[in-house]
């Protein structure tokens, strides 16, 4: 199912008037300059992990959203679940291998999860912060509001659309809400349907597309169809749409700082997350500890 701006029953919320005029966006200029080539990084199970703080990540995302490069910036959260799906130990079909052959998007891979953060510190001898999508998205939306940029969402349930639109209108009033697309899994697995969704998104002139399809679907969809959307940035941010809409509660800060957010989420959604954390997680952690390439 696809919910475009025309289908939302709250038209006055889609283009709310701010008390302060938005900063006009510069006309998009197609360029193909790498934003990540010179970033410090390590490799974890064959996956490049960029070592940046929240401010640097936000600046890279805002820059790409404004410039609309030929190769959009795709942002991924690197955690044990990501290693399970895309690490080199998964074999030659992993996205890490595919990216050497096809470069439709440029990936900014951020530390997500205490195990990755601790590994980076062991390798480099310096602390690097955990940058989960659910934490970063608030500052990204704040910057998008200041710049008057358009933001769209792909994934999640159509039942959260009204709550999502309402919160964005209230907290980030200068954002141009581009739409909320909620295709069924059958549509996501169909090349024809996936291309249609990408064209629909492109028609709404999206600067930032938040892709919440879950791993590995969101990364695979971005890799294959992200450039077709015309967005400057594609954020592979999992359950962020549900967090923003208030459907799922975030863990308290003290839980997150202790590296136990996974346990909080497991307690909230045991049936959905038990396999990820209890079965798939341990082998991914072993692959992490075997990684020595910094």
Image (cartoon, rainbow, N blue to C red):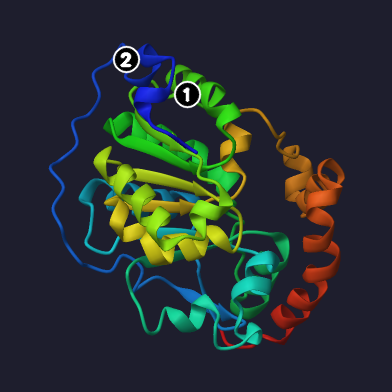
Residue 258 numbered tag: none
Q: Which residue is denoted by mark 1 in the rendering?
A: 165
Q: Quadrant of residue 60?
A: bottom left
Describe residue 279's horizontal placement relative to residue 51 as left or right: right
Q: Does residue 122 lie above or below 133 as drawn?
A: below
* Badge 2 or badge 1: first in the primary sequence: 2
- Along the line of sight, which residue is nearer the eye, 144 or 83? 83
Question: What's the residue at 28%, 46% (across, down)?
Answer: 202
State the image coordinates of residue 252 (x, y, percent, origin top left).
75, 37
Q: How many marks?
A: 2
- Circle 2 sits in a helix, a strand or a loop, which is it? loop
Question: What's the residue at 43%, 14% (across, down)?
Answer: 10
Question: What's the residue at 52%, 27% (across, down)?
Answer: 161
- Circle 1 sits in a helix, a strand or a loop, which is it? helix
Question: What's the residue at 18%, 31% (across, down)?
Answer: 24
Task: Tell me if mark 2 has few (under 14), some (14-19) or many (20+) residues whose alpha carbon lies within 10 angstroms of its own.
Answer: some
């Amino acid at each position: 199912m696809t919910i475009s701006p025309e289908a939302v029953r709250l038209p006055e919320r889609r283009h709310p008037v701010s008390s302060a005029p938005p900063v006009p966006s510069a006309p998009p200029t197609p360029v193909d300059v790498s934003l990540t080539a010179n970033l410090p990084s390590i490799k974890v199970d064959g996956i490049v992990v960029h070592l940046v703080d929240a401010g640097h990540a936000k600046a890279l995302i805002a820059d790409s959203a404004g410039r609309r490069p030929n190769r959009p910036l795709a942002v991924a959260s690197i955690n044990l679940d990501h290693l399970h799906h895309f690490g080199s130990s998964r074999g030659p079909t992993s996205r890490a291998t595919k990216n050497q052959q096809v470069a439709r998007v440029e990936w900014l891979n951020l530390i997500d999860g205490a195990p990755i953060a601790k590994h980076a510190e062991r390798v480099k001898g310096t602390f690097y912060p955990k940058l989960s999508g659910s934490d970063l998205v608030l500052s990204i939306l704040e910057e998008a509001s200041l710049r008057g940029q358009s933001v769209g969402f792909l994934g999640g349930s159509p039942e959260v659309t009204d709550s999502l639109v309402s919160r964005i209108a209230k907290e980030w009033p200068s954002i141009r809400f581009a739409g909320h697309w909620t295709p069924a899994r059958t549509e996501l697995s169909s090349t024809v349907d996936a291309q249609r969704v990408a064209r629909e998104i492109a028609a709404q002139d999206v600067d930032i597309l938040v892709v919440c399809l879950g791993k590995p679907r969101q990364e695979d969809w971005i890799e294959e169809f992200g450039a077709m959307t015309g967005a400057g940035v594609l954020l592979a941010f999992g359950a962020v749409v549900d967090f923003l809409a208030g459907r799922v509660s975030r863990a308290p800060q003290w839980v997150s700082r202790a590296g136990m957010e996974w346990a909080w989420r497991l307690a909230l959604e045991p049936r959905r997350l038990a396999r990820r954390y209890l079965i798939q997680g341990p082998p991914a952690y072993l692959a992490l500890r075997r990684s020595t390439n910094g």
